Image (cartoon, grey):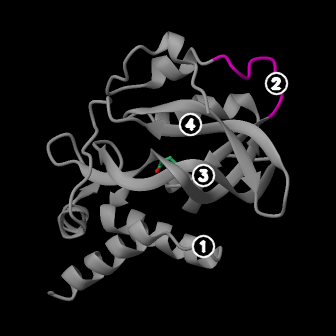
Amino acid sequence: MSHDASATPSAGLDTTAANRLMDYFDHHDQVWLFGYGSLLYKAGFPWLECRPAAIHGWARRFWQGSHDHRGTPGAPGRVATLVPEPGAVCDGMAYLITPAVFDQLDIREKNGYLRFVTELYFDDGGREEGLVYIATEDNEAWLGEAPDHHIARQIADSSGPSGPNRDYLLQLAATLRALGHADEHVFALERALLNLERGG
Ligand code: SIN
């Protein structure tokens, strides 16, 4: 995987401008985008084709703070990002989109996420180069690793303009299950959240 890092020496809290400088797929009429968090369970943008897919060497983790969707600047929620992990496979959805769609995606993902170039492996075979939004640990909204019960507590207590943080986690878990994929990190957080909500 590579990233057009030349234009983005460090990821500020609003990454829109940095992503607009990403020119790797300039002159392409169509680009594959990989979604693994909200982009997996709720596209909300126009796509030409949509195929279950995976990327390799990355693990999904609820280590990114959300100030704009599932929390607020004063009380950030926790949402998914990807961290490098040799041998890991992250299951998600590949969308074939026109470059114009990045105008809205860059704004939706502006809280620390940068576009990276990656190889997408389709569940039904074949692979294509595409893009994925990743919030790396140098971004200002990064929260990092924490015990499951701590992350679940923060998710249970957080809400933002896009709705309760719990809905993000539960919808992601349900979508992975419907696709026939397991993600132990996501499922463990789901269990911890539901346990908390039962008063456990
Ligand atoms: C993604 O879903 O691919 C990026 C993170 C998010 O929007 O939740």
Marks 2 and 4: CB-CB under 8 Å?
no
On residue 28, which mark appears? 2
> Dot 1, how many residues are within 10 Å of its Cα: few (below 14), some (14-19), or many (20+)?
some
Label 3 – label 2 distance at C-alpha:
22 Å
Q: Quadrant of residue 137?
A: top left
Secondary structure at numbered mark 3: loop
Among numbered discs 3 and 1, the one appearing first in the sequence: 3
Q: Decide: is 194 above or below 61.
A: below
Depth-wise, is mark 3 or mark 1 nearer the camera? 1
Reading the image, the residue beneath label 3 is 44
Residues drawn in magenta: 23-30
Reading the image, the residue beneath label 4 is 105
Q: Amino acid at mark 2?
A: His
Instruction: Please check the rendered image and state whether residue 28 is part of the magenta-colored stretch, yes or no.
Output: yes
Reading the image, the residue beneath label 1 is 181
Q: Quadrant of residue 146?
A: bottom left
Assign the N terminus to one quadrant of the image: top right
Q: Decide: is 156 above or below 74.
A: below
Q: Quadrant of residue 136?
A: top left
Secondary structure at numbered mark 1: loop
Q: Amino acid at mark 1?
A: His
Depth-wise, is mark 2 or mark 4 nearer the camera? 2
On residue 160, which mark appears? none
Depth-wise, is mark 1 or mark 4 nearer the camera? 1
Does the closest atom of ligand 1 sit within 8 Å of the Cβ of label 2?
no
